[in-house]
Amino acid sequence: MGLTDLPGTLIAGVWRQPSGRAALVTLGLIVAVALAGPPFLPDPAAQPDVLGQASLPPGSGHLFGTDPLSRDVLSRVVGGARVSLAVAGLAVLVSVTIGAGVGLVAGYLGGTVDAVLMRLVDAALAIPRLFILLLLLAVWDRIPLGALILIMGTTGWFGTSRLVRGEVLRLKQEAFVTGAEALGAGRARVMFRHLFPNTLGPLLVAATLGVGDVILLEAGLSFLGLGIQPPRPSWGGMIFDAKAELLTAPWTSIFPGLAIAATVLAVNLLGDALSGALDPRQS
Amino acid sequence: MIRWLLLRCLQAAVTLLLVAILLFCLMRLAPGDPLSRVSGEQQLTPGALAHLREQYGLDQPIARQLAVWLAGVVRGDLGTSIEYGRPVTSLIADRLPATLLLGGTALLINFTLGLWLGAVQAVRRGAPVDRWLTAASLAGYATPSFWLGLVLAGLVAVRWRLLPAAGMQNPLLPSDAGPWVRGLDIADHLVLPAATLVIVSIASTMRYQRRAMLEVLPLPYIVAARAKGLAEPVVVRRHAWRNALFPVLTLAGLWLPILATGSVFVESVFAWPGLGSLAAGAVGTRDYPLLMGTALLVSSLIVLGGLLTDVAYGVLDPRIRWA
């Protein structure tokens, strides 16, 4: 399968599976609302009238109701979607790039480089990512969004590098690689022109599943006050703010919770469908 | 065999050493040093700050600080908590039993329920049961544990008053209560946090079990068992399930990090007096020695878990030793 027709083939392969179709439609809807929704919604940070408009139930002019500070819950959920998806997408881009680079180098060069890199990755994988993030984030008073993305990205590549290294080890002996080497291709050329394109499939699956992980982690960190900073809306932060009103105004925490679960579920189903489309023998 | 065992243990020791070094580097990556935050919040005089720096060894060169930290780790000395003013090891020792109780219970339920449900799915592959179980477990996996915990606590504990919402023991229990009463009280408190952890983590167990069973079911010895007239439940339970169990159990390395992460949120939501809520609290107070200590302990448990499953697998299946 050539590189140019890969996207088309993959989408068709995903669409053929019922769960893949559901995931694509759900994600498409979420992304569309996140991108196009805000102009039609009230300002997520606006507090029109703290007394009269606070904690209104769904309906009543506000589809998802209002929170105790009289802010529109729907616009905050949509605003949270924008931030969550942007952070997750960019962070995964960073981690996949680093992971692919390290995996290619370790797998192709082998020897001491491989041994040293993989021992380090072993150690990094033994520390749960949340604990790494807690250590890195605890120093910030209010973390800028860019720094948060960078930190999420640089802590998520350990597993990916293992995956890519495994693929490279498998591919290294194949004729198209030894052929390129025999024709005098340099190491960098073999790695990036010949090996890298052939790891794209598994890399894409890992990236998709990685997006789900980052959304959950970011929500958790925002819940602990370490992630996205108010007044910027975030799903985790909304749930934390609504803790006290869980029973009196349940809509303030139900909707952001459902938004997280629906998005992560759709992303994970898409990842599964992608891996099914790449390797039809599975599942 | 002995050689392989020694090598594997050596590898685990190297990993642990690297973990300790990595944790130190992570802490020092922070701009300023751990005390700059504390001093900003508590308005310390420069003299007091310098004294604290000296006390925590932060005025020493970095290499020396690393050496001191590693020497301490080897001796089992993880420093002194800034917030509590007590040795980190004794704080951790106080909290560890509660986390082991919660995590152990969750893992036990996860295994028993997950292995059973995964097997059911494999046997009924493609049937509505299979699809619904997959959907339900994946939905649980996608649900944030802190949100699920809050919703369960709100509904089951606060609204319906069926179970306690927070803590591990009822403080109003009479002091002469017997061990049975105390045990039941702890069990009451355990239900909701353990259920939350199981719901968000059972999907992987079910998936691996389902896949392992699907690989075993078409094998010739299953066909032979059926051909000699064994009843289907016997074939499934005695022949297929037992052999599918093996690869699944070695994946414990996968569950430990998930449980450790989940317990930070779940323990915080349910005020469970374990390591997770200790770590979450240490973030709030910027208590670096405590945070590093809990991270080191959790990572050591993960490395140890990986070593044990590898060794068990190597002992039982000689092919692994040479791979």
Image (cartoon, rainbow, N blue to C red):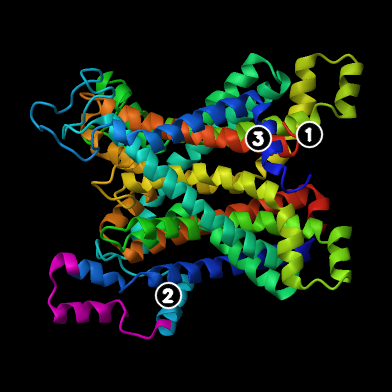
Q: Which element type, helix, strand or loop, lies under badge 2? A: helix
Q: Nearer the viewer, mark 1 or mark 2?
A: 1
Q: Which element type, helix, strand or loop, lies under badge 3? A: helix
Mainly helix, strand or loop, the magenta region? helix
Residue at 21% of width from left, 28% of height from top?
A66
Q: Which element type, helix, strand or loop, lies under badge 1? A: loop
Residue at 25% of width from left, 17% of height from top?
A59
Residue pointed to by mark 3:
A11
Is label 2 on the same chain as label 3? no
Query: Which numbered marker is on residue B269?
Result: none
Q: Which chain carries label 2?
A: B
Residue pointed to by mark 1:
A281
Which is more toward the observer, A266 or B181? Answer: A266
Is label 1 on the same chain as label 2? no
Magenta stretch holds residue B161: no
Query: Which numbered marker is on residue B69?
Result: 2
Residue at 63% of width from left, 63% of height from top?
A101
Which is more toward the observer, A210 or B107? Answer: A210
Rendered location of residue B85, percent (x, y): 25, 65
Rendered location of residue A97, percent (x, y): 58, 59
Q: Mark 3 lies on which chain?
A: A
In this picture, is A239 found above or below B40? above
